Image: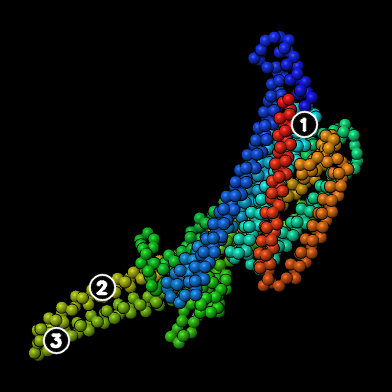
Amino acid sequence: MKKMILLVSMLAGVMTFSGCVDDKESASVTAVREAKAAQLSALAALSNAQAANQQALADTENALREAKVAYETAKAAYQQALADKANSEAQAAAAIAQHQMAAAQNEIQRLANELEEMAIQHKIAMLDLQTQYETALKNADDDSQALLGGLYTAYQTAATNLLDAQRDIAQQKIDLAKLQAGLVDSEEAKQLMINKENRKIASAEQTIAEWKAKLEVFEAQKAPEEAKAELVTEKAALSQLAQDKAKALEAADKAGEEMNDARSDINDQKYCGLAMDVTGDKYGNFIDEEGNPTGEAFGDFIYLLGSEENALGKPVEATVNTYWFMTTDDKGNTTYTAVMNRMIQKNVTKTETTAPGVESTNTYEAYPTYYYQLNAEGVKAYIAAIKANVEKDEGKALEDAQKALAAKQKVVADLEKAEIKDEVAIEEAKSMLPGLQTNVNTAQAALDKANAQVAAIQAAFDTMAAEAANWTATVEAYNAASEAYCDAQFVCEKAEDAYGLQNAKVDALEAVVRGNVIVDGVNMTFDQAIESAERQIANAIDTISTAKQEIANIEIAEADQLKALAIERLEAEIAIAEAEIPALEKIVADTKAALDAATAAQAE
């Protein structure tokens, strides 16, 4: 600041001595002005990035709210359809509701993936913005660099902490929605809770390591000049770790894109679309030449259901992972037959050591939303059952029409063979023949139409069978991409842990050079900072102890209580986290105000 004030004073002196206005500014003044402009630009970029991310989070929460409403609405419609009499209309309503539930589940999972990608991209942006600001400070004097660098770090840390907290809340709401939407079973609910506690332990271990690194610097009580010399070496190491972190983040971002592309490949598979068709209501209506439903109901169609139980009781062979149909014989015996297995998405947990003594847990998807597998024998039975319905309805109708026509034709023939012909009776009988023939023609057309519909259903299953190998390969490619993304996140965490530890040391050395410590926007003496660090370490130790006890409690919980327990915990954690947001917002405002004031003062 002294150097900038001196430059301004010198310029004022020159202007007074010359007695005239010189439109040309000196190189030194230009440097001051450009440095200030660069600092303001970097600050604006950070502010804009934070605003954009907060808006994206708000959009995600709105979309999640809509997806949850869609799911609950579809679920209510589905349960109502199952409660109704088991007729074709109720089955059609259940099939439609099942699709709407699946669509809502897909949307919830998409939002989860989008949130992860957003987090990585924000971290990449933050590294870039940090570099921009450090570059902007290079033209300032040493005192200014120390002051503004520390204030900028405090502001950036506060802003990132706020955004992380908001993102954590969004993630918790997505986890809650997944539990409520049936995307997570009891075992996964248990693992979800354990994973959360493990992440708390990992974060607390890293917190302890970082505060210990700061304590070591504070307690060494080095002179500012000695700290400044050490800072050069430590900043160079931090710069390398920043590059490593940036590379890891870029790799994770790329892995995330490849995973999303692999998911799109699944949705583009012919098999996927056909699976949705045969488990939905498409073939419950007749289809036109282009394969589109005409809106005219196909009464012989048998809807496939995926519920664990229905109004008639729990199917013998059906589980929540199966699409099945039921048939009842003349004696009232009901048979349940599985046609297609529905392998629900499973989250596989992996654990790695991402820093000395710190274990981190991540998950990846073993199946994307719903992965359908055909039961060949079940398909045969299903097609046979629909054919039997056609034979019983349209086939019987044709047979009856043909019999009626044949009977009337025999009446005409008998009348014509009679020794005494009754011309009136003959003409009357003959007059009925065209109408009876029309009935036969109509019945034949109806049978042909029904058979064509059965053929279309058969063709759909045949195409699925032919595409099964491609489908399996595509799903396996997605699974591999999902696991690769999980592994890339571990690499990121390792790089972030290493960067965070080194950054803690640099931050402490900068505080020594500056002569004061900034914690959550508050200036402290070194004695106060040491006390604060010891409190942070003690709090982190308590967090680890509590998390380990929570894991022990989860391990002994009853299986049928796990989902309810997970929902209860998430709702409580969300409420607590949301209550803490105002305090984080105040820290952001305070650190931003301090940085703005110091930045403005550099021009004085």
Q: Nearer the viewer, residue 242 or 10?
A: 10
- The residues tagged by marks 3 and 1 sit, at their Cα atoms, a distance apart of 118 Å
Please, is residue 64 above or below residue 127 in the view?
below
Q: CA distance from mark 2 to mark 1?
A: 93 Å
Left-right relation of 603 to 380: right
Residue 470: image x %, image y %? 53, 59
Q: Which numbered circle lies on residue 415?
A: 3
Q: Is residue 23 placed above or below 149 in the rendered structure?
A: above
Query: Cβ–Cβ below 8 Å for labels 2 and 1?
Result: no
Query: Relative to 326, is 8 on the left or the right?
Result: right
Secondary structure beneath dot 2 equals helix
Judging by the rendered image, the residue that carries numbered circle 2 is 441
Residue flagged by tag 2: what amino acid is it? Asn
At 33% across and 73% down in the image, what residue appears? Answer: 447
In this figure, which colouring scheme has been used for the structure? rainbow
In the rendered image, residue 585, in percent from the top left (x then y), is placed at 69, 46
Q: Determine if residue 155 is in view.
A: no
